[in-house]
Image (spheres, rainbow, N blue to C red):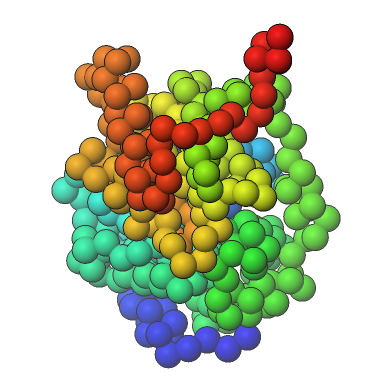
Amino acid sequence: MKVGRRTRLKVQELAEILRRSKRILIVMQDNPDPDSIAASLGLGRIGSSFGVELCTVTHRGTIGRAENRALVQYLGIPLAPCGQVDFSTYDVIALVDTQPGTGNNCLPAGCKPDVVVDHHPVRIKSRFAAMNDIRVRYGATSTILTEYLVELEISPDTPLATALLYGIRSDTQDLGREASQADIDATGFLFSFADHRMLGEIQRGSVERGYFAMLVSALENARVFGRALITSLGRIEANPDMIGEVADLLLRDEGIAWTMCTGQYGGKLLVSIRTSAGKDRADRLIRTVVSGKGTGGGHHSYAGGQASLAGKSESQCARLQRLFERRFLKAVDVKSDQWSRLVQLAHDKQ
C-alpha cells in the first residue's frame, strides 16, 4: 500500500508532537461509532511506538449500538468517562473522528486540541491545532490512521487491524457509501491482518430486549411525506445510537429518498438524517434544520445534529422538534400537510 505526500508530511508533524509527549488524551465523539473507536486505538498504537507512557481514550455518552459494544468488548480497551478525566494533566489532547465546535464531543470550552484527525467537513477551530489532518473525501478516519501506520512501518496486530477494517466498512457501508480509493486501498491492506471470524461476530452483536421496543416505537411513529419519512424515538434512556440506526433502516423503503429520526437523550434533542438522493447533501440540510438552535454536520448521504433542551419544558421541547421537522420537510421540498403512516397500526384496523 502506497501513501501520498500529504500523509508523509502529516506523520512528520505528528511525530514531532509525540516525541516530546508522555501523556496523551484522545477524545472521541460523545457516542462513538466503530470508526471513531478504531481510529483512536490506531493513534494510541502510534503513540506507544514513540514512547508515550500513558494514552487515555475518553468520550461522553454511551456505546449503545450492538456492533459498537461488541467491538469494544473484543478490543478490551478501557474507555474513560469524560467526567473523570482531568484535561490539564495531559501533554497532548487529540480529537479523533470529531472536531472542536461540533457539539458532539466533551472538549472543554476554551481548550485547544494539539491534534485533530477527522474526515468530516473542516471546522475553523481545527485549523488552530498544531497538527490537523481533515480529509473530507475519505470515507473513514480509520483510513487516515491506516495510512499513518503504513508510513511509520508499523504492522497492525490482529485486534487493531480488525478494528480499523471494521471502522472503514462500517462508515462506508462496506465501501458502498462515499468510499474513496484510499478507503479501498486501506481495506485491502488490512484484510490479511484481520480476524474475519471476529468481524462476523461483531456485525452480529446481540441486542438487549429494549432494542425491539424502540424499533416498534420508531415504526409506529413513522410518517411518510411523499419521498420523505420522519419518525421519533421520544425520550431515550439508553442507546442513542438507535436514532441513526433507525434512520438507516427506514431509508431502505423503496419510495423514500430522505429520512429523519429524532430522540431526546442526555438533555439534548438528537437528529439523524439520511438520503439516497445522489445530487443532494445531508450535511448541508442538517445545518439548515438546526440553524440557530444547535449544531450539526456530516457527509453527503448521512448527517447528525443536536440541540440543547436545558431549561425547556415538555411543550417547548415538542415545539423545537416540530420546528426541526418543518424545516426538514421544506428543505426536501415536500408538503407537510399530506402524509400517511408507514405501517398501519392494529387499533387503526378495528
Residue 109, x across and y down, in percent: 19, 44
Give the residue at x 63% y 85%: 1
Give the residue at x 44% y 82%: 7
Instruction: Report the front residue among 315 and 84.
Output: 315
Residue 188, x across and y down, in percent: 70, 77
Give the residue at x 37% y 70%: 134
Q: Is residue 159 above or below residue 323?
A: below
Apparent side of residue 60 relative to residue 157 in the rendered image (left or right):
left
Residue extending farthest left: 110
Whether residue 210 is visible to the viewer of this picture, yes or no, is no
Give the residue at x 41% y 32%: 337
Residue 214, x across and y down, in percent: 61, 25
Whether residue 250 is visible to the viewer of this picture, yes or no, is yes
Q: Is residue 267 above or below residue 65?
A: above
Instruction: Report the front residue among 334 and 88.
Output: 334
Look at the image and tell me in which quarter the C terminus lies.
top right
Residue 127, x across and y down, in percent: 23, 68
Q: Quadrant of residue 167?
A: bottom right
Q: Quadrant of residue 341?
A: top right
